[in-house]
Amino acid sequence: RAWKILDKERLVSNVLPGYFGCKKYESFTRQLNGWGFKRLYQLTPDNGCYYHPCFLKGIPKITCLIRRLASNLGKAKPNRNGE
């Protein structure tokens, strides 16, 4: 249900330039927030992972439901108790 960036440097050098219009990790995470992805902060194995309810392995058809959020709605303060 969630995915994690394991090698930030490799992501920045190999993936971002070819697939995203940015070259900085911070810009990429800002884009994730804008598309409604949430970073998980609970003290579980998913800590630091990103999650979106319409981005699930094995169900590619629902990715069309992912929409860009209105300004200032992407990044919200994390709810550490009940993500």
Image: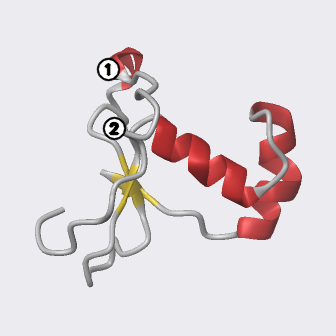
- How many numbered marks, from 0 up? 2
**Residue 66 position (above or below residue 27):** above
Instruction: Residue at 52%, 44% (x, y): give it.
Output: 32
Instruction: Residue at 72%, 58% (x, y): give it.
Output: 25
Which residue corresponds to mark 1? Answer: 62
Q: Quadrant of the C terminus?
A: bottom left
Q: Percent x, y for residue 4? A: 50, 63
Which residue corresponds to mark 2? Answer: 56
Viewer-proximal residue among 23 and 73: 73
Q: Percent x, y for residue 53? A: 26, 38
Q: Percent x, y for residue 59? A: 32, 27
Disc 2 secondary structure class: loop
Instruction: Residue at 69%, 58% (x, y): give it.
Output: 26
Using the rendered view, name the quadrant where residue 57 is placed. Answer: top left
Q: Percent x, y for residue 7? A: 70, 69
- Which amino acid, mark 1? Ile
